[in-house]
Image (cartoon, coloured by chain):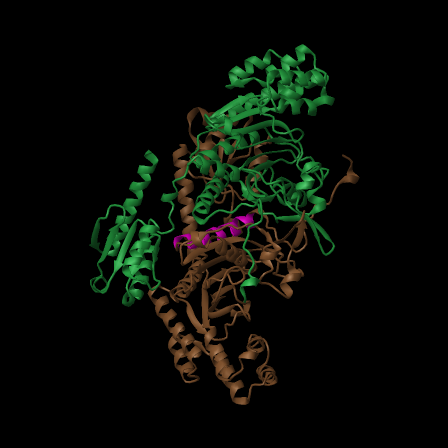
Chain colours: A green, B brown
């Protein structure tokens, strides 16, 4: 092959790819979240990345269409999934008679949106979704379970997160009371900007939609309601007697009772949580790093009326949650949350000489079977350059396997951080490395 | 929405999707294999599913092209990956200066091949790949490490597998000796069919390629060499003195020594292992269920000369292994390897009454925090129908939470298999469920 035939290696623009050590960290986050899902009796699903376009486009419209990766192969018109919810709907509609309801499923997988590349947004990213789907009806207990599950995900990642919960029926009830249901979407679009625009601008836009002064002030007062359930409930009860409004509030109170029983801790109620315009109908919630609300929501979820409406006559209400793990990981990297140096694929490097390769590999194997991440620098290099390599790669321990060590079955263990070294049996080496590992863990938890 | 607008929910033809319980089993296989990779100091990589077509098609040709999912979006010509090796090559070529060599990476991910659907073949399937890449050169120790890693993957799955190893240099050396290097691919294509066609047909085809009687018999004799290293070595040493031939044999012997040191067990040498026609250049290996060779290879791997030839002038030799996990899983399902009934997302169902919902959810939470997979049947149904549901879903334990139980803090645990029931503290319930779990595990291992 000649040079001028070489292809420049490039990753697709807007796509996300981590270096191995960062990937180790990211994978460990996924693993922790998956563990939470499993412990809470959610079942795994792993739908194909591709679906028939007819299936995927059933629900979407407007902007989403342009973002979708859609193509034909042979006579098949297909798309890459842009979320994990439509594939869930397709799956549930197909297999309704084989599933137990409420059907609790989780899926952790990549989704695709060909949007304009921008900071913190990727064209391929992970979603960690868990949903509970009912057959015909679904108790509000499921909503509480989802909120609690959501909280547990962040706890598993050792993150101090506050979950803000609302119920869309409260706002919808008030809009119904003032006879503006035909303007619901317009109103929600304005209210969704309440944290971004000045209040006079919000009030002005509400006026343009046709809300009178009293209505404008009341709706803003609803949206600005937040606190513990008692505070929120007392304030809202004075505002409206609309049935839908009161049923939303009652659900909020019930969820609070359930969350207390289920050990929910960092949960507050905030009527400013809306989450989009048409999908959610009851409970809605979002998560924020405690004290860092300005960084934006880390994920969210809520109750929807009917999962499978496009595929089936059967009404299947559901409630779901989604951790935006790709965005969260990038945020945590940026906030220096991780100690990359603690992440090493090698805990102990075994240094061999030409004539001790086989016993060195035996040592590596014994260490691995004892749960120590050991590796041998077996490439044909000098002792000095192997020690340098161990240092450069920040390997904590080194074992030197010379002829003498092989004959006596005693090996020299060197702690590369402290410089200490001692000659001992392999079993003692394993103990030393494991104690050091425990000590480092304790230390890093204390910091 | 009216009925006639409903879309029939369908999964794309030829795509694979498991029901949740099967998915639990499949996920557990992936998890076990990933654990082996991590314990052996391989680093994770998670490249995008999409790549520039220029990148992915650099290497492929012929049939692969037709199978590839290729499309354009805007002005970008892209493909879904058809293996995990080309993305690895692209990654290594891009980041060579940031990586440590030998670079040990694993990737577990889906790949896409739009081939004609047929039994046991899917258009989207998982590969579990691990490779060791050298910079300029790579010791044969890496080959041994890969073979041993490959064996460990199957051990982790509790499968009795035999690994058959060969070295392509042996055959290439003999072909060189008889001056037929220009016919190498033709010869390999014929030899690859040695287990499928009658011997006279093989000999006839070799004759057509231009091998004389002695050459045909010798090459068949090489291919039919198998056994332990001593047997293989003794037989082959008599056949040729060609340098390449002897260096292949020497590598095989060295790998055997290394594998012994590294605890390799079920390894034999079989010169019939060829693995394709142009990619591998040295060590090659495949795995078979012991005693069920007729089911075909479960996976394989080998040594290649240069990973990044299409992207870089630097020579980067490598050795890799791949477990064909989608095919393996289907084979194991078909062979009734799994006990699906042992797989349950719920170990313990909590049965509440209308007035004990909150304490029931508290019990569920306490069980979950103690590591018991508990769930509450909170839908508003009768006691009888909840017990029936527990039975139908083969939940092993049921806890009944009535008013009396809540007042006394003592709960009734019922073992649904034996019918036994007893009233006890929650902490004792946890102990009972965990002991039963251990006992079942021991029992199932003994079978």
Q: How many marks?
A: 0
Residue visible at 43% across and 45% down?
B437
Q: Outermost residue toward the front?
A: A4
**Res. A410 image quadrant:** bottom left
Q: Position of residue A186 (x, y in %)?
A: 69, 24
Q: Outermost residue toward the right?
A: B4
Q: Does A256 appear in magenta?
A: no
Residue visible at 64% across and 66% down?
B62
Q: Position of residue B116 (x, y in %)?
A: 67, 61
Measured along the vertical axis of the image, is residue A196 above or below residue B179?
above
Measured along the vertical axis of the image, is residue A161 above or below residue B79?
above
Measured along the vertical axis of the image, is residue B164 above or below residue B70?
below
Viewer-side residue, B291 vs B8? B8
State the predominant SS element of the stretch in magenta.
Answer: helix
Dividing the image into 4 quarters, which one contains the C terminus of chain A? top left
**Res. B446 image quadrant:** bottom left
Q: Does B27 appear in magenta?
A: yes
Q: Position of residue B281 (x, y in %)?
A: 48, 70
- The answer to whether residue A427 of the structure is visible from this angle is yes
Dividing the image into 4 quarters, which one contains the N terminus of chain A? bottom right
Query: Is A226 positioned to the left or the right of B409 in the image?
Result: right
Q: Where does the magenta region start and end? A: B21-39
Residue visible at 24% across and 45% down?
A418
Q: Position of residue A388 (x, y in %)?
A: 30, 54
Measured along the vertical axis of the image, is residue A412 above or below residue A69?
below
- The answer to whether residue B415 of the structure is visible from this angle is no
């Amino acid at each position: 092959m000649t040079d001028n035939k070489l292809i420049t290696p490039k990753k697709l623009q807007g796509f996300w790819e981590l270096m191995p050590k960062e990937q180790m960290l990211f994978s460990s986050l996924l693993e922790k979240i998956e563990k939470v899902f499993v412990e809470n009796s959610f079942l795994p699903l792993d739908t194909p990345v591709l679906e028939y376009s007819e299936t995927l486009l059933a629900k979407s419209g407007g902007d989403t269409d342009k973002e979708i990766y859609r193509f034909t192969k042979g006579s098949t018109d297909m798309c890459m999934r842009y979320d994990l919810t439509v594939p869930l709907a397709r799956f549930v509609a197909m297999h309704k008679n084989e599933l137990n309801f409420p059907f609790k499923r989780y899926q952790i997988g990549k989704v695709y949106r060909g949007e304009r590349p921008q900071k913190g947004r990727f064209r391929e990213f992970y979603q960690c979704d868990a949903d509970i789907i009912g057959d015909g009806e679904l108790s509000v207990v499921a909503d509480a379970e989802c909120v609690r599950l959501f909280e547990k995900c962040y706890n598993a990642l050792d993150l101090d997160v506050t979950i803000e919960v609302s119920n869309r029926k409260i706002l919808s009830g008030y809009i119904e009371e003032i006879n503006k249901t035909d303007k619901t979407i317009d109103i929600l679009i304005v209210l969704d900007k309440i944290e971004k625009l000045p209040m006079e601008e919000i009030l002005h836009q509400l006026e343009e939609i046709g809300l009178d002064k009293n209505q404008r002030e009341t709706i803003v007062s609803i949206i600005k309601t937040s606190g513990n359930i008692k505070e929120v409930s007392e304030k809202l009860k004075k505002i409206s007697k609309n049935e839908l409004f009161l049923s939303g509030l009652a659900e909020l109170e019930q969820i609070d009772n359930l969350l207390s029983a289920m050990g929910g801790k960092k949960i507050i109620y905030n009527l400013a949580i809306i989450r989009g315009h048409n999908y959610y109908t009851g409970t809605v919630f979002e998560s924020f790093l405690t004290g860092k609300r300005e960084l934006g929501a880390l994920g969210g979820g809520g109750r929807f009326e009917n999962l499978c409406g496009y595929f089936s006559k059967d009404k299947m209400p559901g409630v779901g949650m989604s951790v935006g793990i790709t965005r969260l990981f990038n945020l945590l990297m940026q906030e220096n949350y991780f100690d990359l140096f603690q992440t090493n694929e090698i805990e102990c490097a075994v240094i061999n000489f030409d004539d001790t390769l086989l016993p060195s590999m035996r040592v590596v194997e014994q260490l691995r079977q004892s749960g120590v991440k050991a590796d041998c620098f077996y490439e044909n290099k000098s002792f000095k350059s192997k020690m340098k390599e161990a240092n450069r790669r920040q390997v904590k321990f080194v074992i030197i396997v010379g002829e003498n060590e092989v004959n006596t079955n005693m090996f020299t263990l060197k702690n590369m951080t402290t410089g200490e070294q001692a000659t001992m049996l392999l079993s003692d080496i394993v103990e030393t490395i494991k104690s050091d590992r425990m000590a480092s863990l304790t230390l890093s938890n204390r910091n």
